[in-house]
Image (tube, helix red, strand yellow):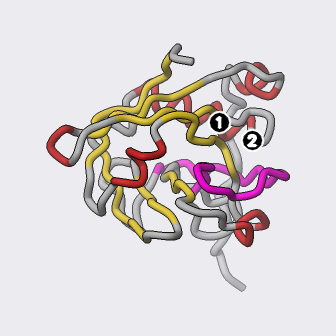
Amino acid sequence: ASDDRLPPDTATVPRRAVALALGEDVRLRVTMSPMTGGGSFVVRLRGDNAPIMAARILELANRGYYDNGNWHRVEHDFVIQGAGPGSNEYTGYHMFLRDELGNIPHTRGTVGMSTRGHHTGDAQWFVNLKDNLRLIQDYTVFAEVVDGIEVVDRIMEGDIVESIRETRDR
């Protein structure tokens, strides 16, 4: 027998999860450091697909969790991944985020949650650079790029995220 089990889910439901599930239009501006190319892009949270995960990401962003994180993985014609502090394949947020697998396909510009297996979301984002339809059964889509996809396309491995914050820009 093994003690290798997921920790119990002791987290409470984030305050804005219900509003997101009911259609609240919430957007986050991802501002890149001018030292690594600059620019910004905007993602719309998909509370209709993953309300709890979207609300958790919103809380982390507004607390400054993503400030000065980096994109540690760039695979052209696939995804960019990272955004979190000290991002690499082995670090992430200390509280796992549970999957919310829905029916939104992983098309170009959708934003998914990095995991190490089911129910192990680490708060690192990945942005689909092309349609990756095979990912739907394993990764949660919690947002989509609605402005600035050209900035996403320019991101290089190691580029720094200056900040991610809620924005009223439409």
Q: Residue at x 67, y 81 (%)?
A: 2
Check the picture and name the quadrant holding the N terminus: bottom right
- Report the front residue among 150 and 30: 150
The residue indicated by pointer 2 is 50
Write down the region rendered in magenta: 93-113
Task: State yes or no: residue 41 in magenta.
Answer: no
Q: Is residue 20 left or right of residue 29?
A: right
The amino acid type, in three-letter code, at marker 1 is: Ala
Residue 115: percent from the left, percent from the top?
58, 63
State the mark number for residue 54: 1
Q: Is residue 23 above or below residue 55?
A: above
Q: Regarding mark 1 in the picture, which secondary structure is present there?
A: helix
Q: Is residue 143 above or below residue 61?
A: below
The quarter of the rendered structure image containing the C terminus is top right
Residue 91: % across, % down: 40, 61
Instruction: Name the quadrant containing residue 135.
Output: bottom right
